[in-house]
Image: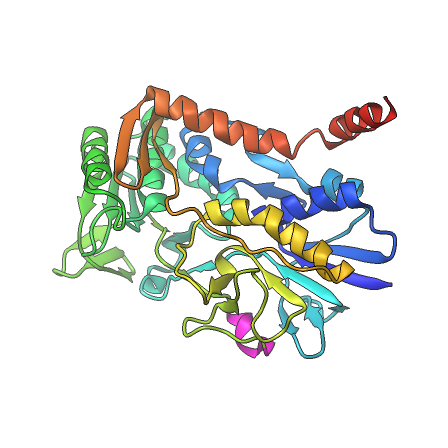
Amino acid sequence: MKRLVLVGGGHAHLSVLQALAHEKLNDVEVVLVTPSAHQNYSGMLPGWMAGHYQLAQCRIDLQPLADAAGVTMVTDRIAGMDADRRCVGLPDGRHIEYDLLLLDVGSEIDVSWLEMAGDKLLPVKPLDAFFDAWPKVLAAASAQSGYRLVIVGGGAAGVELALAAHYALQRNASDAHVDLVVSDSGLLSGHADGVQRRMTRALARAGVHVHAQKAVGIEQGVMLSDATVLQADCVIAATGARAPSWLQPSRLLLDEHGYIAVNGQHQSLSHANVFAAGDICARQDLAMARSGVHAVHAGPVLAANLLATLKRNPLATYKPRKRSLYLLACGDQYAIASWGGFSAEGAWVWRWKDRIDRGFIARYSNVDERRDTLTHKEAI
């Protein structure tokens, strides 16, 4: 019997679990190694922070999906791997051997420039830790006059977190002050000018102070490149990504930034029995932005490729769309749409985003109900 090991509870694995539930492989043992029995959905994080969602509405229970697929779930983090020996290691020293492996664990936040902020520093990843920490930040801000919150990062995550945090603090009758540091590359680099202008206005309306300078962490908070000190009670890092350090000794071929080098089928260039999805890998045949959109869209292709590998069939290529749609939450039930050179904003964009996000959660929930319905249809 062969063993397929899925590491991480990322977006791509949802498609794989769903495919395995329909395929029912009798000669393959499947193991899912994930740090949490739930997947907290990053797309709904700003809405949850702002108070528009309950936590249960933003997460997917992985156990029913694993049960439906006949998958054994191990709730733990990966500590390392040896691709030549075909095994992954857990923090307690255990090893899990595999014949076929899919890694979908995401990236880490690069906090190297902010580490001197010490206990004040709160990276947005790992996401589970941030979901646990934010209510404590909100409680501290509500209990303390003049609480100062600094968010570092000018990408989509940074601006959404800043607006969500400001809205939540206002709802809790807090007089907290929110600063957003976007570095000298500016706000929403890579998005169209119209999107940047709309977001600049949204931040100004909310009263979020934007600083287009580099920042380093200090004991008091952060220091900007012009030596201005931003006092902070909490520094949220939504800065650039970095590859997990345990990849370095993994024996997998990595790119110059330490990410797993993969081909168009998201297969390791050095080990054909290893596949990777999401932020942990880098396509070598084309340039592709690091976005959760690709992990979601690549999921069905990866599911098909895992099954094809087991059956020795040809593999499919994931072809990313030329443009990705971004729906950026603005704190209140208002959002900005970004798609190539097109942009729009309004409450209707929020409703659009809300419908998409709720639909994503619903797609992987109520597994037993969907399975019963499918069985009934097959019987008919």
- The structure's colour scheme is rainbow
Q: Residue at x 66, y 50 (%)?
A: 303
Q: Position of residue 63 (x, y in %)?
A: 73, 42
- In the image, 93 versus 45, the foreground residue is 45
Identify the main secondary structure in magenta: helix
Does the magenta segment cover residue 24? no
The quadrant of the picture occupied by the C terminus is: top right
Figure quadrant of residue 168: top left
Quarter of the image with the N terminus in it: bottom right
> Residue at (64%, 44%) from the top-left corner?
14
Q: Is residue 186 above or below residue 172?
A: below
Say which of 41 and 176 sits in front.
41
Region of the chain picked out in magenta, as a range: 245-251
Please identify the residue farthest to the left as the structure is shown: 226
User: Does any portion of residue 109 appear in the rendered image?
Assistant: yes
Let me know if residue 250 is in the magenta part.
Answer: yes
Q: Can residue 55 be seen in this snapshot?
A: no
